[in-house]
Amino acid sequence: MISLDRYLGCISGLTYGDAYGAAYEGGLFEKLIWKIIGRTKKGKLRYTDDTQMSIDIAQSYLSKNEIDSDCLAEQFAKSYQYSRGYGPSAAWLLKQIKKGSHWKNINKVKFSSGSWGNGAAMRAPVIGLIYAQRPHEMNQAIFKSSVITHAHPLAIEGAKIIALTVSSVLCEFSTEHLFEKLILNSNHSIYRKKLETAKNWILHSVKPSQNEIKLHLGNQIQASESVISAVYFAIQFKNHRLDQMLHPIFKLGGDTDTIGSMAGSIWGAINGLNKIRRIELDRIEKIDWILNLGEKLYFNKQEPLNPPIE
Ligand code: F2R
Ligand code: MG
Ligand code: MG
């Protein structure tokens, strides 16, 4: 039986990593923009597309009791706001869906094989939670939730790795077995190689430098340049506090909110909500509403839950 504390730990860790990491994301321009729009009128930390699309998956699942790509595409499009900092291709796609296009006709327009950004992986922890006890249905759900905006096989595989990691760490696990399972389930050598590196660093107590982490695991917007870094940080620092685990991610720069949210979700699934400082969570907008949504998902309560206006 998965505990509610760990379930909510995953959702709040995701939101925390995203909301706190957003201020460090990207170059000077992005940081400057976030300084201006990164707070609500009440002074709360705003979350970004990572959390928003995760919320969308939870809401869409609760309304259909399954991952339905058409319903989810509508939900993604309805929630889209420029100020949540979506990736450029994802933003374009969602605006087209809002105008009436079907996702199937546009998800390979910008890139002929689809986007390989980490936008599918960043929302995959919720799939890991929903399907933790139905693992044989997880790959299909990952595909359906990813392909709307991310048709590229590397983006879908990154999402699969994150969902599989979350579902695996919700119960007791060994680091060695976790990495073996992830390697066994990876179809692409780029992921297998990075998983081997992360596994060896952790199991042999190697302390890589920031440059080595960037070089061997990555810190960028591509799924293949961010997913394994998130797994590495969450497992390497699983016995530290959440802010201590996130600190080196934010220092690394690059795609800090997304690596932070993916790592935060894994760390939270291991440690639970109780290990996250409430005072730090309370600085994030709509956090009680997000936790309420997480509870509905846990108990599979199919009731509408509209977000509060803040
Ligand atoms: N986008 C950001 N942060 C920068 C904020 C920008 C600012 N708000 C603005 O809009 O100017 N963060 C968020 O984006 C990442 C998730 O991105 P996602 O959803 O994967 O986006 P997208 O657009 O699909 O892919 C990102 C870019 O990667 C390149 N790319 C993708 N696939 C490609 C391919 N097959 N060939 C070549 N290039 C490809 C493109 O430049 C895409 O635009 C998260 O970090 C989230 O926090
Ligand atoms: Mg973001
Ligand atoms: Mg990001």
Image (spheres, rainbow, N blue to C red):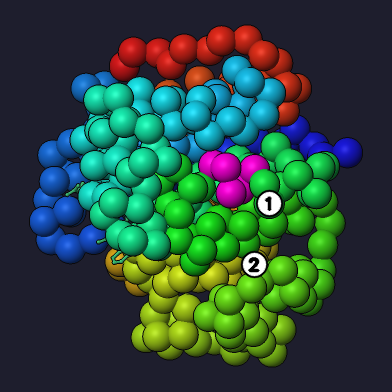
Q: Horizontal and vertical percent for residue 303?
A: 63, 10
Q: Residue at x 62, y 62 (%)?
A: 161
Amino acid type shown at disc 1 = Asn
Can residue 198 be spotted in the picture? no
Please tell me whether residue 2 belongs to the stretch shown in magenta: no
Residues shaded magenta: 141-145
Amino acid type shown at disc 2 = Ile
SS for dot 1: helix
Q: Horizontal and vertical percent for residue 20?
A: 37, 47
Q: Quadrant of residue 258?
A: bottom left
Residue under circle 2? 235
Q: Residue at x 84, y 56 (%)?
A: 172
Q: Quadrant of the N terminus?
A: top right
Q: Quadrant of the C terminus?
A: top left
Is residue 246 left or right of 163 when viewed as pictured?
A: left
Q: Nearer the viewer, mark 1 or mark 2?
A: 1
Can residue 90 be spotted in the picture? yes
Q: Nearer the viewer, residue 278 or 109?
A: 109
Q: Residue at x 35, y 53 (%)?
A: 108
Looking at marks 1 and 2 on the same chain, the residue that comes earlier in the sequence is marked by 1
Residue under circle 1? 139
- Mark 1 and mark 2 residues within 8 Å of each other at the beta carbon: no
Q: Nearer the viewer, residue 130 or 18?
A: 130
Please tell me whether residue 142 belongs to the stretch shown in magenta: yes
Is residue 234 left or right of 212 when viewed as pictured?
A: right
Is residue 185 left or right of 177 when viewed as pictured?
A: left
Vertical order, 201 against 309 (above or below): below
Q: Quadrant of residue 93?
A: top left
SS for dot 2: helix
Q: Residue at x 42, y 25 (%)?
A: 74
What kind of secondary structure does the magenta stretch mostly adopt? helix
